[in-house]
Amino acid sequence: MKNYLNVREDVAEAIREGRPVIALESTIIAHGLPRPQNVEVALQAEEEALKLGVVPATVGILGGEVVVGLSPEQIKVLGNEDDVLKVSRRDFAYALATKRKGATTVCGTMLGAHLAGIEVFATGGIGGVHRGAAESFDISADLLELSRTPLIVVSAGAKAILDLPKTLEFLETLGVPVLGYGTSLFPAFYSAESELPLDLVVNSPEEIAAVYRVQQSFGFEQGLLVANPVPKRYEIPRETMERYLQTALKELDRAGVTGKEVTPFLLAKVLGLSGGKSLKTNIELLFNNVRLACEIAGIL
């Protein structure tokens, strides 16, 4: 793997010296946010980490290498070109062998970060079990990756477009702890709370780090999902978001969109229905997760 892993020098140095580092994904740049906000937000997320004394490492695939620590120029490449591959674990070998430009999903970022020796990863929301999965079998590879890659993943729960009850059930089956950060209800991405209870609640970064250390001491291979609610002042109430989603899902059926295009399609529809508020919420919850991830990384 060393032939395919390119860790930016300042990131590698921080890892060697035991200084705090967090991973960031690149799918949000290439596929998650509209232009030009995609590049602006990615760079602002890195700046947020740096202000807190933490080295940010955005993960992506360029020139036949897994780049852990994209430069600003490389972030702009992924954010402004149209042929960027969405890379999960399944796509790694193909993207590297064909030297395609690739933006890593939650799953792909976890894999790249773990190979580099990073222990904490901040994202917006994880993928999960899609609505109608009983017929489509559409379940994100993020969930399986969480079961086999020992990384702390800080998110605002799972994306609201998903079947959240089934997503939580699947995580339980896979043995992935879901820690509610200051909440006993699972966050629903745009909304601070769903109706779904969480059994495992923590109230400080120190508690999160302690749980992770115990997992590591047992040699458990699964990750740790930290469910960090979006700040209330930025949330879209769950009832309002559900109305948007029902409308978007009807349009999805009419359009016949499937596979990897489902999430971008639904997010774009929600953006329009919310009058742009969903974009603001998405950005603020990401920054909120970056800040918590930095606190955790500073303790490990």
Image: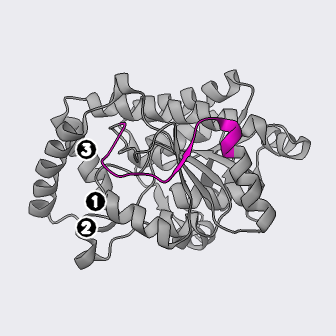
Label 1 sits on what residue type?
Answer: Val
Res. 102 visible in picture? no
In the image, residue 246 sits, relative to residue 291, either above or below, namely: below
Q: Is residue 149 magenta?
A: no
The residue singled out by tag 2 in the image is 258
Label 2 sits on what residue type?
Answer: Thr
Res. 228 visible in picture? yes
The location of residue 142, given as percent across then percent down, is 49, 63
Q: Quadrant of the C terminus?
A: top right
For label 1, the SS is: helix
The residue singled out by tag 1 in the image is 262
Q: Camera-side residue: 78 or 270? A: 270
Apparent side of residue 53 relative to residue 283 in the rendered image (left or right): right
The location of residue 114, given as percent across then percent down, is 71, 58
The location of residue 181, given as percent across then percent down, is 53, 40
For label 2, the SS is: loop
Label 3 sits on what residue type?
Answer: Ala
In the image, residue 24 sits, relative to residue 107, either above or below, namely: above
For label 3, the SS is: helix
Few, some or many residues within 10 Å of mark 1 (<14, 14–19, 20+): some
Q: Which residues are magenta?
A: 192-208
The location of residue 45, given as percent across then percent down, is 56, 31
The residue singled out by tag 3 in the image is 268
